Image (cartoon, rainbow, N blue to C red):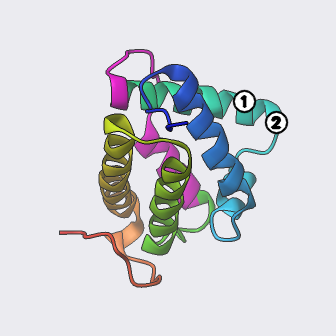
Amino acid sequence: MPKQDLDQRDNIAKLVRTFYGRVRQDELLGPFFNGTITTEEAWESHYDLLISFWELNLLGKPGFDGNPARAHHGVDKHFRNSISTAHFDRWVALWSTVIDELFEGEMAEKAKTKAAGMAKGMYKKILDKRPGGFIVPGSASGLSFG
């Protein structure tokens, strides 16, 4: 049976829930997410927000009401400006892996491309809010900050 594409909310929900289930268990990413989103009720709200975010970004469907830059800046500040390119690299790699395991098609490819671009942009926004705009050393990054 062929894999489905990310062309409807139910499929986006499956992606978001599967992906963040893995993120929560990931030794690099888990501490940031689990230290920020601390209850199952909060996770459910976060899932709903992210599903709407990806519906907007993949399908153009209005309904997302959030500020990702402010949220990420807050997490970085809470964790003493320790988010590095290694965290974004892991996030993008895991995102792409989950998509490849579960989905295929135009929107699946678009989701991978958009995520990589968003990671670059978000890291730049985080750095802009840091004192001195410094980069915390991390592993070599596949992200291109040009």
Q: Secondary structure at mark 2?
A: helix
Q: Which residues are magenta?
A: 57-77
Say if the magenta span includes residue 60: yes
**Left/right of residue 52 with respect to residue 28 in the rendered view:** left
Residue 40's place in the image compared with 84, above or below, is above
Residue at image position (34%, 56%) is 116
Residue 110's place in the image compared with 7, above or below, is below
Q: Residue 50 occupies which quadrant of the picture?
A: top right
**Residue at numbered disc 1:** 44
**Left/right of residue 44 with respect to residue 16 in the rendered view:** right
Residue at image position (63%, 32%) is 47
- Residue 2, image x, y percentages: 49, 37
Specify the amino acid type for callout 2. Answer: Glu
* Disc assigned to residue 26: none
Tell me if label 1 and label 2 are in contact, CB under 8 Å: yes
* Closer-to-camera residue (131/86): 86
Farthest residue to the front: give it. Answer: 1
- Residue 123, image x, y percentages: 37, 60
Residue at image position (57%, 39%) is 15
Say if the magenta span includes residue 66: yes
* Closer-to-camera residue (124/4): 4
Residue 86's place in the image compared with 140, above or below, is above
Q: Secondary structure at mark 1?
A: helix
**Left/right of residue 46 with respect to residue 86 in the rendered view:** right
Residue at image position (52%, 58%) is 97
Farthest residue to the left: give it. Answer: 146
Specify the amino acid type for callout 1. Answer: Glu
Give the alpha-carbon distance from disc 1 to disc 2, as whole Å: 6 Å
**Number of marks present in the image shown:** 2
Q: Residues within 10 Å of mark 2 (few under 14, many from 20)?
A: few
**Residue at numbered disc 2:** 40
The quadrant in which the N terminus is found is: top right
